[in-house]
Amino acid sequence: MKVFYDHTAFIPPFGGVAKYHVEVMKRLPPHMYVLSAIGSGNQYLRESGLGHCTLPRHLRGSKYWMTPITAAMMRVARYDIYHPTTYDAHLQWFPKGKKVVVTVHDLNMVTVPQYYRDVNRVCPSLADQKKVTQRADHIIAVSENTKGDLINYWNIPEEKITTIYHGIGPALKNLSPERVFPFDYILYVGHRNAYKNFNNCLRAFKSINNIHKMLNLVCTGVRFQKNELAQISKLKLENRVFAVSATEEQMARLYRDALLFVYPSYYEGFGMPILEAMQYHCPVVLSDASCFPEIAQDAAYYFDPHNEGKMAEVMLDVIDNVSLRNTLIQKGDIRIRNFSWGESANGHMAVYKSLL
């Protein structure tokens, strides 16, 4: 049995989908897969040793080079199953006579389209994604919530879907005891798209800051956009809200030293930062929407994402109650044991074998 993985997730230098595929492939026997990612500049692929780059730096990660290489490899390589690394791969790539497995990470543009100004413009391939998913021989969903969305929105038969959770790698050791920031802060991680509910989070933080005037909100990811800066200024939080870019080691220390990690999204397919926060003993405060109660269970404190007052109240409870913070940390230590990349890889192998 051999599985073919294409290059599409490995065009960008980073990305959660690329990391997911790398973590699974690292745990499969090398003879079990073919990877077409020549020319990729993806950091996770490079660090894993699974991929190699034979192109000059300025050409790495170019789909103009990688796409024809993949197309050629698909014609000549020997394999039984095609697992596209993004589920919007072109329909014409589906090789004749091969089984196809697709991983669906979320259906956010289907479940919460109101948070996209123009779904067809943002993601013109959404219809193709649906066709690809419906044509696949089997689908891997990253949560039971995502599995339910596939059944309810795209009419995928339940027996065609297997839920396989993401894992979490080992925690970094020998972290510097030095704090990234000397002050107390709430931690927000990741993008700030409309469905991420960052504006409500800002307003909730303003209510908290009226009580804890020296408290800060640290946001990791891209720098603030003009509209975000305007909102921060309107709330008079210019000296209390920060956007920072952080290395993996700095992220570990940011989780470790935060009063809490907040994830206010209206929808997520899985939510890897939940596991990262638990891994570094950071209390987790979550929206009660989509997959969050499934993933964190009783190891988080929840709020209605539409209610900024409740969001502020829940965060204040965790900030002011040391016993509650310690309880959430202890429950997180237990909950995280249920997520292993080894188990995830075993689940993938079971799906592949079931098709042959």
Image (tube, rainbow, N blue to C red):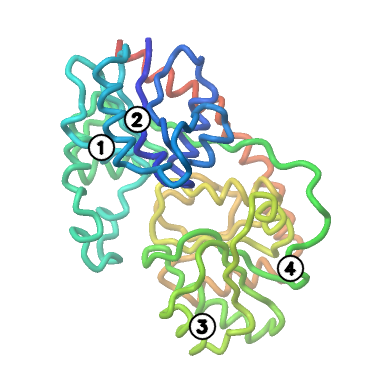
Determine contact: label 3, label 2, CB under 8 Å. Answer: no
Which structural element holds mark 4? loop
Determine contact: label 1, label 2, CB under 8 Å. Answer: yes
- Where is residue 11 shown, x and y percent of the image? 39, 42
Q: Which amino acid does label 2 sit on?
A: Asp
Of labels 3 and 2, the one closer to you: 2
Residue drawn at 53 percent across, 77 percent down:
204
Q: Distance between the residues labelled 4 and 2?
A: 41 Å
Q: How far apart are marks 4 and 1 (CA)?
A: 42 Å
| Location of mark 1 (residue) | 89
Mark nearer the N terminus (1 vs 3)? 1
Q: Which amino acid does label 1 sit on?
A: Ala
Above or below, 67 against 159 in this view is below
Q: How far apart are marks 3 and 2 (CA)?
A: 42 Å
Q: Which residue lies furthest to the right in this view?
A: 177
| Location of mark 2 (residue) | 6
Determine contact: label 3, label 4, CB under 8 Å. Answer: no
| Location of mark 4 (residue) | 181
| Location of mark 3 (residue) | 232
Mark nearer the N terminus (4 vs 2)? 2
Q: What residue type is labelled 4?
A: Phe
Which structural element holds mark 3? helix
Residue closest to the eye, 71 or 276: 71
Residue drawn at 46 percent across, 58 percent down:
288
Which structural element holds mark 1? loop
- Where is residue 197 shown, x and y percent of the image? 42, 68
Q: Residues within 10 Å of mark 3 (few under 14, many from 20)?
A: many
What quarter of the picture does the C terminus occupy? top left
Q: Residues within 10 Å of mark 1 (few under 14, many from 20)?
A: many
- Where is residue 62 shown, x and y percent of the image? 36, 43
Residue closest to the eye, 145 or 122: 122
Mark nearer the N terminus (3 vs 4)? 4
